[in-house]
Amino acid sequence: MESNDNFLENCLFFNTNALSRYLLKLAEKEFKHLKISPAHASLLLLVFDMPGISPKNLGLNLHLTPSTITRFIDSLEKRKLVKRRTKGKSALISATQKGLELKSPIAIAYKKLYMKYTKILGTKTANQLSFDILKASKELTNYNDNNE
């Protein structure tokens, strides 16, 4: 680590958390009118694209624990946005008609969010940063999976 008056400037953990908090504020503004959190919207996007997806696959795709996925599904089911169908010991999650009505508004909210942060950061920087974070996340996941 370089010598620096502020060691936090070199801390990936600190800086990604600070960035995450800022992006979450931007995202919450874009999704507020839909009365849905950005995290719930992300789950719905997967359900729209893969009707009948299992909670396990939702967790893998969203990098969330099974208990968090269960809470999200319970919440969305209570609002009649998704339905849970059991098949043997498995649950399959699909959107309801009410949920499908949010497909376009969610896509628009994500597009507005993208436009907002790319206006601030610049498209090239925003896209490169997203790619670099994804790459780092995969490398850390692979390292963690192989060293547990």
Image: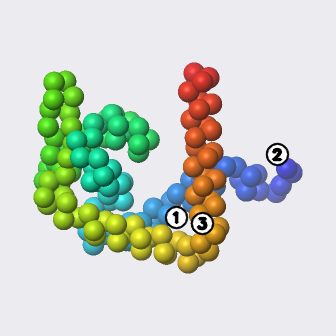
- Above/below status of 46 relative to 98: above
Given the current orientation, which residue lies at the most extreme right position?
Answer: 3
145 sits left or right of 89 in the view: right
- Which numbered dot is residue 126? 3
Q: CA distance from mark 1 to mark 3?
A: 14 Å
Q: Earlier in the sequence, mark 1 or mark 3?
A: 1
Q: Which residue is mark 2?
A: 1
Residue type, label 3: Ala
Q: CA distance from mark 3 to mark 2?
A: 25 Å
Task: Give residue 105's position: percent from left, percent from top.
Answer: 28, 70
- Above/below status of 139 relative to 44: above
76 sits left or right of 7 in the view: left
Q: CA distance from mark 2 to mark 1?
A: 25 Å
Kindly state the secondary structure of the residue where label 2 is placed.
loop
**For the residue carrying disc 1, how many other residues have a C-alpha within 10 Å: few (<14), some (14-19), or many (20+)?**
few
Q: Which residue is mark 1?
A: 22
Q: Which mark is in front, 3 or 2?
A: 3
Task: Give residue 134's position: percent from left, percent from top.
Answer: 57, 49
Residue type, label 2: Met
Q: Quadrant of the C terminus?
A: top right
Kindly state the secondary structure of the residue where label 3 is placed.
helix
